[in-house]
Image: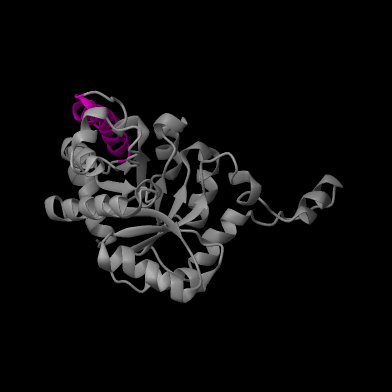
């Protein structure tokens, strides 16, 4: 899927919602445990219920690979179902891969060829040769971790050399060096471009969206952290939306686990519709729909 096709889906559905399929077998409704493949049955019902309101789905691979071959079977059934039922929907393997070239080539083959995902999340900290194998695939996307929503993000992602700060504290004027997440965004734009690269920027880091957009004004951003993690959709849109929307905002637990009863799919649809309605209003404010 290319950038224009993704934008057309956003305009058509008046939504930039990504539903995260973090399908923990310990949290899915108990009555599904009698199914032959409980996780796939859960995913299928969630997809059928939320499809009118979402433009993307993002299985978190840990919830599948942790179950061994059964989990991989559930994941393959899920991506095959999505590709057959709704090929226009953007699919993201939230795998956070990133290794030396030969290994990355096989990761890329696994998710782009064997399972035909549109995109994969990649950790960029081993540098260009760990990312470039993913970028070799036409019409596929790499989504680089830039500024995540977890508490420990500040350990490294906000780091900048202390010398500039020390000089400023002494009254010596100095331009502060860029934070590590800024260097990731700027350096990686030499590897890919707006048609095949996105960035993960957490909704709970909304204060930094202005800086992100200064460095990457046209790229799409995958934004986790609304809903259960407390990020503000309005703040994200205010500082992060561009003239092609440029956002895929993910919600996982707040939608898929909104109910653990027999009505789980209907409640998930209701929650997804509520988010979609908010997004439609924000798109209208921007003049995009």
The residue lying furthest to the bottom in this view is 102
- Residue 258 position (above or below residue 89): above
Q: Residue at x 36, y 42 (%)?
A: 249
Is the N terminus in the top left, top right, bottom left or bottom right quadrant? bottom left
Q: Is residue 270 covered in magenta?
A: yes
Task: Report the residue at 54% width, 66% height from top.
Answer: 187
Residue 190 visible in this rendered orientation of the protein: no
Q: Is residue 242 left or right of residue 157?
A: left
What count of labels does the image hold? Answer: 0
Depth check, front residue: 279 or 17: 17
Q: Foreground residue, 203 or 49?
A: 49
Q: Quadrant of the C terminus?
A: top left
Question: Residue 266: horizontal and vertical position, in percent?
Answer: 19, 27
User: How far across and down, in percent of the image, does residue 191 sit?
Assistant: 46, 71
- The magenta region covers 262-286
Determine if the magenta segment contains residue 14. no
Residue 35 visible, this angle: yes
Q: Give percent across and percent down for residue 121.
A: 41, 56
At 48% from the left and 64% from the top, the residue drawn is 98
Q: Is residue 272 left or right of residue 181?
A: left
- The answer to which quarter of the image holds residue 272 is top left
Placement of 142 over or under 45, stated as above or below = below
């Amino acid at each position: 899927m290319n950038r224009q096709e993704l934008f057309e889906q956003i305009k058509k559905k008046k939504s930039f919602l990504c539903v995260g399929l973090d399908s923990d077998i310990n949290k899915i409704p108990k009555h599904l445990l009698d199914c032959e493949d409980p996780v796939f049955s859960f995913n299928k019902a969630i997809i059928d219920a939320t499809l009118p309101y979402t433009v993307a789905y993002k299985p978190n691979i840990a919830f599948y690979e942790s179950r061994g071959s059964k989990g991989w079977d559930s994941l393959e059934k899920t991506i095959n179902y999505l590709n057959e039922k709704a090929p226009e929907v953007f699919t993201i393997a939230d795998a956070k891969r990133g290794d030396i070239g030969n290994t990355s080539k096989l990761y890329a083959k696994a998710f782009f060829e064997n399972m035909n995902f549109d995109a994969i999340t990649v950790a960029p900290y081993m540098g260009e040769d760990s990312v470039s194998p993913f970028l070799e695939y036409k019409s596929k996307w790499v989504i680089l971790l830039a500024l995540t929503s977890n508490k420990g993000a500040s350990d490294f992602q906000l780091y900048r050399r202390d010398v500039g700060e020390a000089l400023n504290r002494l009254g010596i004027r100095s331009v502060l060096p860029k934070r590590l997440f800024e260097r990731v965004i700027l350096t990686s734009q030499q590897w890919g471009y707006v048609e095949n690269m996105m960035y993960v920027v957490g909704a709970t880091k909304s204060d930094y969206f202005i800086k992100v957009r200064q460095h990457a004004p046209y790229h799409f951003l995958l934004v986790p952290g609304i809903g259960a993690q407390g990020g503000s959709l309005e703040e994200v849109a205010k500082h992060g939306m561009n003239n092609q929307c440029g956002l895929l905002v993910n919600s996982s637990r707040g939608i898929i686990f909104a109910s653990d009863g027999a009505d789980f799919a209907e409640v998930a649809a209701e929650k997804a519709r509520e988010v979609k309605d908010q997004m439609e209003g924000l798109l209208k404010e921007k003049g995009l729909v």
